[in-house]
């Protein structure tokens, strides 16, 4: 069955006013065949549309629609993409999906590499499964910006890292995009001894050669779980290796800033934490373009938190009931400093930060977003948690009250005997949550079917 069959029509939409009916297939808009969500979004932008709608008996009717420019037409399809999500053609040596324990929900093992999800949802793609026609469509429809997992610009090394002999061609596609002014935000998953050192220098030089089409680059450390049996031997970064990489990237960024007025490349916060380095100041991150990759996230959180604290009246803070915060091992000292800041201002609060060791994936995984409900329950049972436990919202599947291991927020609350409050990555909200002003949001599910939806964890997906 075509995946452009209309499942529902919003009753307040231009499509409904024009008489579009569920069950019809959207065949064309203004003479352009509609294949997927990109065609739909792109060609339905104009204020005057002519829709060709195919009926179940094969006949086609034409409808005219008037609406404001950019207004949503109001159609809902069987899947968000109006097509199947494209899986990747690679077998990367650092792939996080291959390092997950068995028995988790099916959607978490799905390896996506879909240009449409890159544009619409910010997913990263490797450019290894695009046909020449699809490359041309990205250029023709000006699908920009797109997010590219580069890892290295050395074609041979890229082929070896992605275990795909065609991986080197992705760099030529990037050059074509650059010539056609498609903006690209790039990610490098850095693996010690493989694509760092001189290989990283070359990659940064090559990508800088595509500036300004290459708009930003993040360098994130490879995640290494305890489930690597039979996989390529990879080690996590040591403190010294992480420090050397931070120095290397900062030196490159400084030179680029002096010449072009932007640093272009940033290490993720995790690299600074691994290296035991202070996070750079807020200005260093410029536009915070790579927040989703964990670049500058903690600095922004601290700056917001500090501003919120300045605005708060001491009396508001003095009434704070005892609370606790659970987070990953790497960010725990950082959150402890924020609690100290509140104590510095009002002196009386009782707030304790618990670093949760990741037994589920292995202790080398220290980010908060991969902490599971089971680890939370096991490590916090019997601890002094105060009147509420705050957790980073990214421990939960987006928009849901469920942890990565399918344990629910309700189960954790019941086991620990305190309300558990997910807090967004926002310094103002964090202070409010400490003060007891934030309650858990109601569950909501994104409008995506199971096989297209997976949560995005900075630095762990290709
Ligand atoms: S890291 Fe990404 S591109 Fe590589 S195999 Fe895994 S899902 Fe595919």
Image (spheres, helix red, strand yellow):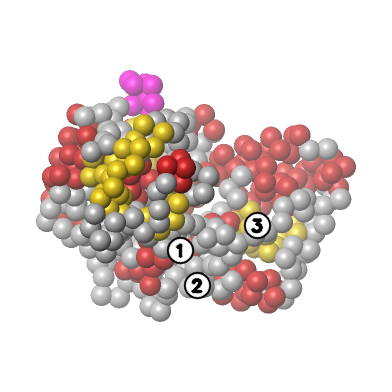
Start and end of the magenta stretch? Answer: 254-265
**Residue at left offset 50%, top offset 72%:** 405
**Of callouts 3 and 2, which one flags the residue occurring earlier in the amino acid sequence?**
2
Q: Is residue 353 left or right of residue 152?
A: right
Residue 250 coordinates in the image, percent (x, y): 39, 35
Magenta-colored stretch includes residue 258: yes
Say what secondary structure mark 1 lies in: loop
Q: Quadrant of residue 362?
A: bottom left
CA neighbours of label 1 inside 10 A, class few (<14), some (14 to 19), many (20+): many
Residue 365 coordinates in the image, percent (x, y): 45, 63
The nearer-to-camera label among 1 and 3 is 3
The residue at the far bottom in this view is 103
Question: Where 341 sits versus 400, above or below?
Answer: above
CA neighbours of label 3 inside 10 A, class few (<14), some (14 to 19), many (20+): few
The nearer-to-camera label among 2 and 1 is 2
Residue 187 coordinates in the image, percent (x, y): 33, 45
Question: Where 190 sits versus 65, above or below?
Answer: below
Say what secondary structure mark 2 lies in: loop
Q: Which residue is mark 3?
A: 441
Q: Are marks 3 and 2 in contact (CB under 8 Å)?
A: no
The nearer-to-camera label among 3 and 2 is 3
**Of callouts 2 and 1, which one flags the residue occurring earlier in the amino acid sequence?**
1
Residue 109 coordinates in the image, percent (x, y): 35, 68
Q: Which residue is mark 1?
A: 365
**Residue at left offset 31%, top offset 54%:** 25
Q: Is residue 445 left or right of residue 149?
A: right
Q: Is residue 154 left or right of residue 344?
A: left
Q: Which residue is mark 2?
A: 405
**Of callouts 1 and 3, which one flags the residue occurring earlier in the amino acid sequence?**
1
Figure disc tally: 3
Whole-number angstrom distance, CA of label 3 to CA of label 2: 20 Å
Q: Nearer the viewer, residue 188 or 456?
A: 456
């Amino acid at each position: 069955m075509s995946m452009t069959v209309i499942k529902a029509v919003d009753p307040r939409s231009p499509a409904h006013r024009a008489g579009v009916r569920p069950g019809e297939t959207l065949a064309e808009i203004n003479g352009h065949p509609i294949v997927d969500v990109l065609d739909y979004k792109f060609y339905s932008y104009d204020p005057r549309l002519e829709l060709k709608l195919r009926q179940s008996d094969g006949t086609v009717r034409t409808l005219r629609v008037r609406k404001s420019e950019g207004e949503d037409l109001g159609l809902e399809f069987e899947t968000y993409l109006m097509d199947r999500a494209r899986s990747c053609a690679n077998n990367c040596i650092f792939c996080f999906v291959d390092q997950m324990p068995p028995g988790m929900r099916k959607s978490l093992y799905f390896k996506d590499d879909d240009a449409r999800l890159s544009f619409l949802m910010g997913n990263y793609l490797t450019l290894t499964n695009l046909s020449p026609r699809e490359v041309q469509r990205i250029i023709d429809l000006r699908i920009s910006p797109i997010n590219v997992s580069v890892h290295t610009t050395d074609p041979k090394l890229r082929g070896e890292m992605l275990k795909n002999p065609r991986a080197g061609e992705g760099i030529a596609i990037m050059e074509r995009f650059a010539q056609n002014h498609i903006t690209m935000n790039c990610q490098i998953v850095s693996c010690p001894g493989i694509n760092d050192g001189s290989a990283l220098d070359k990659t940064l030089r090559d990508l800088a050669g595509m500036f300004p089409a290459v708009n930003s680059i993040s360098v994130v450390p490879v995640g290494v779980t305890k489930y690597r049996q039979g996989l390529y031997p990879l080690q996590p970064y040591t403190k010294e290796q992480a420090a050397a990489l931070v120095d290397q990237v900062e030196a490159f960024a400084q030179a680029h800033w002096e010449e072009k007025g932007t640093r272009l490349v940033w290490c993720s916060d995790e690299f600074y934490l691994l290296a035991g380095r202070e996070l750079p100041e807020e200005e260093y991150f410029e536009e915070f373009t790579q927040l989703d990759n964990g670049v500058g996230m903690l600095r922004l959180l601290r700056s917001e938190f500090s501003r919120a604290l300045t605005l708060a009246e001491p009396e508001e803070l003095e009434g704070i009931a005892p609370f606790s915060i659970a987070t990953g091992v790497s960010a725990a000292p950082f959150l402890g400093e924020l609690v100290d800041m509140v104590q510095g201002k009002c002196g009386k609060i009782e707030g304790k930060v618990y670093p949760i060791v990741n037994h589920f994936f292995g202790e080398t995984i220290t980010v908060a977003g991969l902490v599971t409900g089971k680890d939370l329950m096991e490590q916090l049972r019997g601890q002094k948690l105060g009147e509420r436990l705050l957790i980073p919202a990214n421990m939960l599947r987006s928009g849901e009250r469920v942890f990565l291991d399918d344990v629910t927020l309700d189960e954790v609350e019941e086991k620990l005997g305190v309300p558990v409050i997910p807090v967004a990555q926002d310094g103002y909200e964090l202070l409010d949550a400490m003060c007891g002003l934030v309650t858990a949001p109601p569950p909501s599910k994104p409008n995506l079917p199971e096989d297209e939806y997976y949560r995005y964890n900075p630095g762990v997906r290709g």
